[in-house]
Image (cartoon, rainbow, N blue to C red):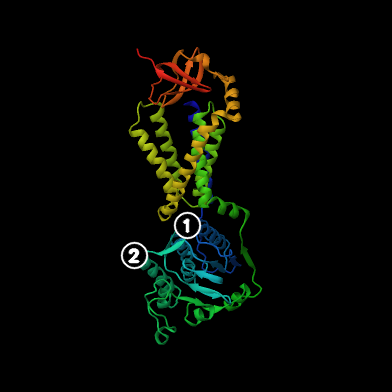
């Protein structure tokens, strides 16, 4: 129990410290921007990332750029984008941040503003498009098995409303904006400037977008946009680009990486329980869970509540294992809290992704535990750990045959593994499947190499 309490304490300390750090660096565009109606500062350019998916990391990346520009009293923010689309939930978060900015924001579409990218573009004061660029195809879809499935009518309707409201706010053609979402909308050359049947989703080229009043003008560089905006051509341009921290943050928030972090935490606890003392397993668990929640809170913008619930759940499970006999309310509540904390860290809008991450993390962890259960007891590393631990009071040898038939006392609960003491020496052992209470009299009934099997003695 002592080593697990130490492990939990270290995990809690690291998660709390990482959470506090994340709270200091979290971007909140609504709270952090100071109103400045008469700014005359630099032009801030948030540079494009080639064909960048819109996800949680990208939403925070843009918010960080908006915050920096607002705090430095910029006169204009140019958001350069090239995206095939992505998560609608994160596009809506970006939209809100753009609309709340006190410094005017314009979009420079440099190649692609598809799907959710069209919504982001329409949420700015003006749109400028480079030659060969496109905007549109914004109907929400789900990707399943490599194929795209159109979202429900309710979700399509919500996206239409979001596109319409954004177009209205920026003085754009609302009917054309809606046709980018719903292929059932019919447009005519006479009334709308373009012919579109009720089976085709609208996507516009640069010239078409300008003609239909979706884009304000054609521009092939930042300097052209500055000139079109009537600003001094010698004005200072500050570029917001991808930093080393952004690269690391982007990597950490990858669903595959989150899955590995989570699996490492689970595997670490398994190793720690199976090996005596506090060592490799504990370190792996601390690193895995700490990195997982740090990525979710600091990079993904999750609430600090998630890691706190994780810690509470872990404490409840430990209470159930080492304080309360049997397995009841505390244990069940603890397990529910641990799983809930993981899902909460993804947020309501990313529950689908969270489900996939947790599912495959469990598969990876269980597979690794099965392999370790078969090969770990025979490994050189396991034997080395066991021998090193012997200097701290644990009995260890290459064979435990001499213990066969001896009686001892359960130093911990057996569920079914635990620790027994014989002649004041401690040994890792396992029951035949039954739970044995702490301080019960037990007897060694079988020895197989390093494996000691015990049963409770009848009084």
| SS at badge 1 | helix
* Of the pair 209 and 309, the residue shown nearer to us: 209
Vertical comparison of 360 with 62: above or below: above
Q: x, y (%) of residue 228?
A: 58, 78
Which residue is pictured at 50% across the width and 78% down the height?
209
| SS at badge 2 | helix
Q: Residues within 10 Å of mark 1 (few under 14, many from 20)?
A: few
Spot the residue most to the right: 234
Q: Which residue is mark 2?
A: 154
Q: x, y (%) of residue 94?
A: 48, 62
**Is residue 17 in view from this perspective?**
no
Quadrant containing the C terminus in the rendered view: top left
Which residue is pictured at 56% across the width and 63% down the height?
69
Q: Nearer the viewer, mark 2 or mark 1?
A: 2
Q: Is 131 left or right of 405, judged from the image as shown? A: right
**Is residue 120 in view from this perspective?**
yes
Vertical comparison of 234 with 364: above or below: below
Label 2–label 1 contact, CB within 8 A: no
Q: Which residue is mark 1?
A: 31
Q: Is 82 left or right of 95, judged from the image as shown? A: right
Quick one: label 2 or label 1, which is nearer the N terminus?
1
* Of the pair 443 and 61, the residue shown nearer to us: 443
Residue 168 image-quadrant placement: bottom left
Which residue is pictured at 59% across the width and 51% down the height?
248
Q: x, y (%) of residue 308?
A: 44, 41
Number of on-image labels: 2
Q: x, y (%) of residue 321?
A: 40, 29
Which residue is pictured at 37% across the width and 75% down the height?
184
* Of the pair 243 and 225, the residue shown nearer to us: 243
Label 2, label 1: how many angstroms apart (C-alpha)?
A: 31 Å
């Amino acid at each position: 129990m002592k080593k697990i309490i130490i492990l939990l304490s270290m995990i809690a300390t690291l998660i709390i410290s990482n959470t506090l750090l994340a709270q200091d660096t979290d971007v909140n565009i609504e709270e952090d921007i100071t109103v400045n109606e008469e700014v005359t500062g630099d032009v801030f350019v948030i540079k494009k990332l080639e064909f960048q998916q819109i996800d949680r990391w990208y939403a925070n990346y843009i918010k960080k750029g908006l915050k920096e520009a607002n705090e430095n009293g910029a006169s204009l923010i140019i958001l350069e984008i090239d995206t095939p689309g992505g998560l609608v939930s994160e596009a809506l978060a970006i939209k809100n941040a753009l609309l709340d900015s006190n410094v005017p924001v314009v979009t420079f579409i440099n190649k692609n503003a598809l799907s959710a990218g069209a919504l982001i573009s329409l949420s700015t004061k003006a749109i400028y498009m480079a030659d060969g660029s496109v905007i549109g195809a914004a109907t929400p879809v789900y990707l399943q098995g490599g194929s795209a499935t159109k979202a429900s009518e309710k979700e399509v309707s919500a996206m239409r409303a979001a596109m319409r409201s954004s177009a209205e706010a920026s003085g754009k053609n609302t009917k054309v904006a809606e046709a980018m979402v719903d292929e059932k909308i019919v447009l005519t050359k006479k009334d709308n400037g373009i012919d579109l049947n009720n089976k085709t989703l609208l996507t516009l080229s640069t010239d078409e977008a300008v003609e239909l009043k979706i884009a304000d003008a054609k521009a092939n560089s930042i300097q052209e946009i500055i000139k079109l905006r009537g600003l001094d051509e010698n004005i200072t341009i500050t570029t917001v680009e991808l930093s080393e921290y952004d690269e690391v943050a982007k990597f950490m928030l990858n669903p595959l990486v989150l899955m590995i972090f989570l699996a490492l935490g689970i595997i670490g606890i398994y190793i720690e329980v199976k090996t005596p003392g506090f060592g490799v397993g504990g370190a792996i668990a601390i690193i895995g869970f700490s990195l997982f929640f740090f990525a979710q809170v600091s990079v993904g913008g999750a609430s600090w509540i998630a890691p706190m619930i994780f810690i509470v759940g872990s404490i409840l499970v430990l209470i159930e294992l080492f304080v309360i006999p049997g397995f009841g309310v505390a244990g069940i509540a603890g397990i529910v809290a641990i799983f809930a904390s993981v899902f909460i860290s993804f947020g309501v809008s990313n529950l689908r992704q969270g489900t996939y991450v947790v599912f495959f993390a469990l598969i990876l962890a269980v597979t690794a535990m099965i392999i370790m259960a078969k090969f770990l007891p025979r490994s050189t590393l396991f034997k080395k750990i066991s021998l090193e631990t012997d200097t701290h009071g644990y009995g260890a040898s290459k064979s435990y045959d001499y213990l066969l038939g001896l009686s001892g006392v359960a130093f911990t609960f057996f569920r079914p593994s635990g620790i027994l003491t014989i002649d004041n020496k401690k040994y890792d052992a396992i029951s035949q499947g039954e739970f044995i209470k702490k301080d019960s009299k037990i007897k060694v009934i079988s020895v197989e190499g390093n494996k000691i099997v015990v049963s409770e003695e009848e009084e």
